[in-house]
Amino acid sequence: MARPPRVPVWLKDDQVVTYFITLCVEHRRPVLDNPPAFRAIQAFCRQNENWLTIAAVAMPDHFHALVCPRKDRDARITQ
């Protein structure tokens, strides 16, 4: 599958933004409905150095999160 075209960056590096993201499991299989998967999601949200997780919800077959880039982030992560 070809890579989609890049979206141009319209935001300045110092502008605060918040993203709502949804990640879905392939074929909507309920593989996130277990303690190890939940702990892995928790650890990722807590330990990610470039993103602040404001809120997150893990469902059996998908995951929602409100995230924003940290102020001291590498500018390349939002490009």
Image (cartoon, rainbow, N blue to C red):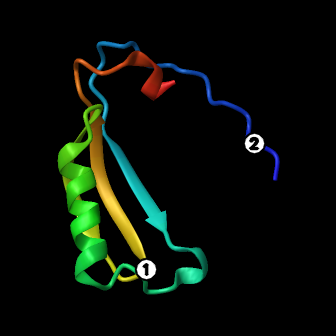
Of 35 and 26, nearer the camera is 35
- Residue at mark 2 to residue at mark 1: CA–CA distance: 25 Å
Residue 10 falls left or right of residue 72: right
Of 75 and 31, nearer the camera is 31
Of 76 and 37, nearer the camera is 37
The residue singled out by tag 1 in the image is 61
Asked if 10 appears above or below 56 in the picture, the reply is above
Residue drawn at (31%, 73%), measured in percent from left and top? Answer: 37
Where is residue 6 shown, x and y percent of the image? 67, 30
Where is residue 67 shown, x and y percent of the image? 28, 44
Residue 21 falls left or right of residue 48: right
Type of the residue with mark 1 = Asp
Mark 2 or 1, nearer chain start = 2
Q: Residue 33's image quarter?
A: bottom left
Q: Which mark is residue 3?
A: 2
Where is residue 14 shown, x and y percent of the image? 29, 13
Asked if 22 appears above or below 48 in the picture, the reply is below
